[in-house]
Amino acid sequence: MLIKSKKLPKYVLERTSGAFQYKRNVPDRLKAIIGKKTFRHSLGKTYDEMVARLPVIHKKVEALLRQLDDEALRDRVLATVETNFGKRAAQMLDAGDVDENLDMAMFDLGHQLEDEQGVEPMVVAHLIGGSLPYSAFSLSEAIELYADYKDASDSKKVSNQLARITTDLRLAIGDYKVDEIPMNALTRADANKYRDYLLERIAPNSVTRYINSVRAVINHAIIERGFKMENPFQGLRIKGAGNVKNARLPLSDIEAQTAADVFLDDDTFSSIYLLLRETGCRLAEATGLQVSDVNLQEAFVEIRENRFRGIKTDSSARKIPLSQDAIKSLQGHRIGKSDDEAIFARYAREGGAGSASAAMLKRFRKVITDPKKALHSLRHRKKDQLREVGCPEEISRVLLGHSSQDVASRYGAGHSVEVLREWIAKTW
């Protein structure tokens, strides 16, 4: 059904079928490069779909035209230098290695060509400036590049994280700096504004995580595109961030047992809780286990990347000895399953750890009301237990999957399961 009552935005056509289309002519100067005369993109079948999709499509077309314009101008400047000074001079300019002689030669050539007909003013400007046009690459384009690298289309978690970062950046430093200016034009002041914006609404440790993500986005673009720039988000100081003492308190023995009782009527919750309590592993490490990760013969669980989840850090990959109670509990979840199936099928999925945490915390809070105590407190408890039995710090780090700053600890095959069992068994 044709919509005659609403004026359509620029570059939008309504087809006879009622569907909407983005149609834009390619500038004459770029037709040979692009290989077509018109950009056409579907904008959906309804007016609301068109309104939602138009900004996204328009932004991509604008970015492509800007990039191609920069590349075409770059090629024309290089061709002019090669014609007048030879291939080596053009290669030096392309590499950004412009010495004093080449700089002066380009300066003189630019002024000679300034009044000649048919010579583009922008070519002349770059000759006089001794430079090539910088290929504009915005922060939002860097985010898209990172999204492709991280397969965000297949991961709701990554997709939501990058969408949240993009929204916050736009609110903090403005759409123009996110979408329009070259990424290398961003400053430390922009990074500080983003940090301060986040600190007004979320905890310092959460701010650290967000900034780490933005830093990773920019570093990826720098490497992939070969940009010569410093990352303005590198080394930002965040007041209050770090391991705050007592941010999470360990559970006492009585509290750990009291909490265990509220899960007894659910085999999955009961087994997950027991695993957290006996090993000190992370909740995501427990919910993402597959059958082959549990070795009943040698009585250990192996934390490693599998098809249900990755691991937090390289040091998180480890083998943790299991108690007899844990073995018995896990055995019931392995029966009738192949090696690549999930131990806890209900939660072995993206976002599964979060769902398990929410469901288990609802029960947990019925008996443990202190906000500084949660399921993660079992991990703190295990750390304290290992310390109390005199476990060497290096072995404690291995059992809990903590990273070590000691270079020597990264060499060799590591500690045997038997040595690890000797210490962790003292905490059961």
Image: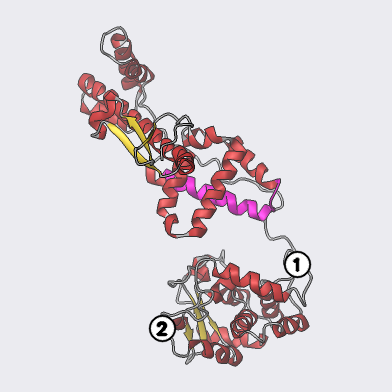
- Give the quadrant of residue 261: bottom right
The disc at residue 281 is none
Vertical relation: 111 (above or below) 355: above
Instruction: Determine the secondary structure under disc 2.
Output: loop
* Spot occupied by residue 110 in the image (x, y as percentages of width and height): 32, 14
Is 131 displayed left or right of 324 in the figure?
left
Q: Main secondary structure of the magenta part?
A: helix
Of all residues, the one furthest to the top in this rendering is 115
Q: Is residue 212 magenta?
A: yes
In the rendered view of the protein, which quadrant contains the C terminus? bottom right
* Residue with the mark numbered 1: 372
Q: For the residues marked 1 and 2, what is the alpha-carbon distance in whole angstroms? A: 38 Å
Residues at marks 1 and 2 touching, judged by CB atoms closer than 8 Å: no
Using the image, determine if residue 257 lies above or below residue 208: below
Q: What stretch of residues is rendered in magenta?
A: 200-222
| Residue at disc 1, secondary structure | loop
Among the 4 quarters of the image, the one containing residue 327: bottom right
